[in-house]
Image (cartoon, rainbow, N blue to C red):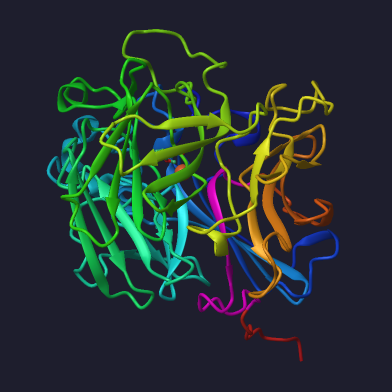
């Protein structure tokens, strides 16, 4: 028997769906651009079975991958659970066998595997296409390969044995110049270990370099920055330890007294050149872009001064602080020629955004002009009755011009809440910023999920695709062109049905 009433699964828009879905030929308002041929893949999660601990957190939910397959101006939708060992073990047992967020000490003894914590992964964070393969990722395990068309799970991928860390972050980077994949795992040799192992693979999947180093303290290295020469690893006050896990706590606590460190390694080195720079407490969950210019490494990040996950408790019991949780676009400059461990940090604009900021991917590691994000625009109305996600609803997509400081915004509606935006270049040769923005919205008034496609320069809506239901929340999404993955057609197969004679 399945009973969600004990929590923490929220009711309303995000109450668990529990089904897999196919919607052939979706409802569309407006015109889907005819030149789009690809798929918008989304990875997120929800609990298929209620969690064993009612205070478990959304980062523990079972992974779900979905796609909006777009071609010839029409859209087909498909959604599937990511069939991790954990998901399948639960189905077999018809109950929740696992426990708290990334804490195997809280799992049922039959599935505990303390020395293989990655077997408890949920693959609920982000999609990635590399070398013709699609993956769903979670930072505590290897990526899970997914069939790009059927979305059925193929299984864990270790790059033909070339990837030996136990973990793989959900934010690897693809260098648009070389096509190389820069990826890494933290806690690389087991639960709470201080090892970070990074790998560089060529576009066709051959290992080019391996980098190993240790962190000043074990923290969530959720995302990195790459430049043409360096990789930058943020370490900040999400703290862990086996003692915490053994007393059935979550994998992370927020410690406002820990400094932020940035580790910088050469992409060509072995990790022994790691330089650590140190600054005040902050949370650097996601990054935007960066460059190496002479001896300087310059990065932009959407960081906050304090914890922005209200569900991650602080070590000292201090309450969640929404002011410190605001994200600003900041530029950090590190000077490798200086022996100092300090760096400079500048807030580029006082407007706060959601920390999910993107660039035109072709400009990763290179000088660039535009940052795309989602935000709460306080100048827009909010429907208290039907809005559903609080007065700070994420109501706008935005584009920030790093050169001029100009903002452009698109307001989605007073009953909606937006998820992460992605940029799609109009074609391979289009100038930076010429293309489309794509992302989903939760329509609280009609309880359905919508996909929005905008012109990325005018920031006006070209098409709105409506699902006839509310879809599992997304963590990250990515657009892949049909040339990058064998995605075929999601049209229904031929059916062989007996007719009346
Ligand atoms: C994040 C998300 C995760 C996770 C750790 O967005 C960090 C940040 C959805 O899972 O496990
Ligand atoms: Fe992320």
Residue drawn 61% across the image and 81% down it: 493
Q: Quadrant location of the N terminus?
A: top left
Give, as a single range, the part of the protein colored magenta: 471-492
Say whether residue 286 is left or right of residue 276: right
Residue drawn 29% across the image and 30% down it: 251
**Which of the 4 image quarters holds residue 443?**
top right
- In percent of width and height, residue 134 lies at 44, 67
The answer to whether one can see residue 143 in this image is: no
- In percent of width and height, residue 86 lies at 31, 48
The answer to whether one can see residue 402 in this image is: yes
> In the image, is residue 68 above or below residue 166?
below
Residue drawn 56% across the image and 56% down it: 367
- In percent of width and height, residue 445 lies at 79, 35
Q: Nearer the viewer, residue 493 or 409?
A: 409
> In the image, is residue 472 above or below residue 244?
below
- Residue 487 falls within the magenta-colored stretch: yes
- Residue 455 falls within the magenta-colored stretch: no
Q: Nearer the viewer, residue 204 or 335?
A: 335
Q: Residue furthest right?
A: 30
In this figure, what is the number of numbered marks?
0
Q: Nearer the viewer, residue 5 or 487?
A: 487
Magenta stretch secondary structure, dominant = loop
Q: Residue furthest bottom?
A: 501
Say whether residue 370 is left or right of residue 289: right
Residue drawn 19% across the image and 20% down it: 247
Q: Quadrant location of the C terminus?
A: bottom right
Q: Residue furthest left?
A: 115
> In the image, is residue 305 above or below residue 358?
above
Say whether residue 312 is left or right of residue 378: left
- In percent of width and height, residue 51 lies at 38, 32
């Amino acid at each position: 028997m399945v009973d969600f009433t004990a929590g923490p699964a929220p009711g309303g828009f995000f109450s668990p769906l529990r089904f897999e879905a196919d919607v052939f030929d979706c409802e569309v308002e407006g015109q889907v651009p005819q030149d789009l041929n690809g798929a918008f893949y989304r990875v997120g999660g929800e609990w298929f079975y209620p969690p064993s601990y009612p205070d478990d957190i959304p980062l523990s939910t079972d992974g779900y991958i979905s796609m909006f397959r777009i071609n010839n101006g029409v859209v087909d939708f498909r959604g599937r659970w990511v069939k991790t060992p954990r998901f399948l073990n639960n189905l077999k047992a018809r109950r929740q066998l696992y426990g708290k967020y990334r804490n195997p000490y809280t799992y049922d003894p039959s599935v505990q595997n303390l020395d293989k914590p990655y077997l408890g992964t949920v693959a609920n964070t982000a999609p990635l296409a590399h070398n013709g393969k699609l993956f769903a990722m979670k930072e505590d395990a290897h990526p899970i390969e997914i069939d790009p068309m059927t979305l059925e799970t193929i299984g864990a991928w270790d790059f033909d044995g070339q990837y030996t860390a136990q973990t793989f972050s959900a934010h690897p980077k693809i260098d648009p110049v070389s096509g190389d994949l820069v990826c890494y795992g933290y806690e690389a040799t087991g639960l709470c270990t201080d090892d970070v192992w990074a790998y560089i693979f060529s576009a066709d999947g051959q290992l080019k370099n391996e980098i190993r180093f240790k962190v000043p303290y074990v923290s969530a290295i959720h995302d990195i920055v790459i430049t043409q020469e360096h990789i930058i690893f943020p370490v900040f006050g999400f703290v862990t330890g086996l003692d915490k896990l053994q007393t059935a706590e979550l994998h992370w606590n927020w410690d406002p007294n820990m400094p932020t460190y940035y580790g910088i390694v050469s992409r060509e080195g072995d990790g022994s050149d790691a330089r650590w720079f140190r600054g005040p407490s902050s949370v650097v969950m996601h990054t935007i872009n960066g460059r190496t210019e002479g001896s300087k490494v310059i990065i932009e990040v959407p960081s906050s001064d304090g914890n922005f996950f209200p569900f991650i408790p602080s070590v000292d019991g201090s309450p969640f602080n929404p002011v410190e949780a605001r994200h600003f676009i900041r530029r950090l400059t590190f000077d490798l020629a200086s022996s100092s461990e300090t760096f400079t940090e500048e807030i580029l604009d006082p407007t706060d955004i959601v920390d999910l900021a993107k660039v035109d991917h072709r400009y990763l590691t290179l000088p660039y002009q535009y940052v795309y994000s989602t935000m709460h625009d306080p100048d827009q109305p909010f429907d208290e009755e039907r809005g559903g996600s609080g007065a700070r609803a994420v109501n706008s997509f935005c584009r920030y011009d790093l050169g001029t400081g100009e903002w452009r915004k698109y307001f989605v509606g007073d009953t909606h809440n937006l998820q992460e935006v992605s940029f799609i270049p109009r074609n391979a040769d289009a100038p930076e910023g010429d293309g489309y923005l794509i992302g989903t919205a939760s329509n609280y008034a009609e309880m359905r999920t919508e996909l929005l496609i905008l012109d990325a320069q005018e920031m006006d809506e070209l098409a709105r695709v409506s699902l006839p239901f509310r879809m599992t929340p997304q963590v990250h999404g990515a657009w892949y062109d049909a040339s990058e993955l064998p995605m075929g057609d999601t049209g229904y197969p031929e059916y062989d049905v007996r007719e009346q004679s």
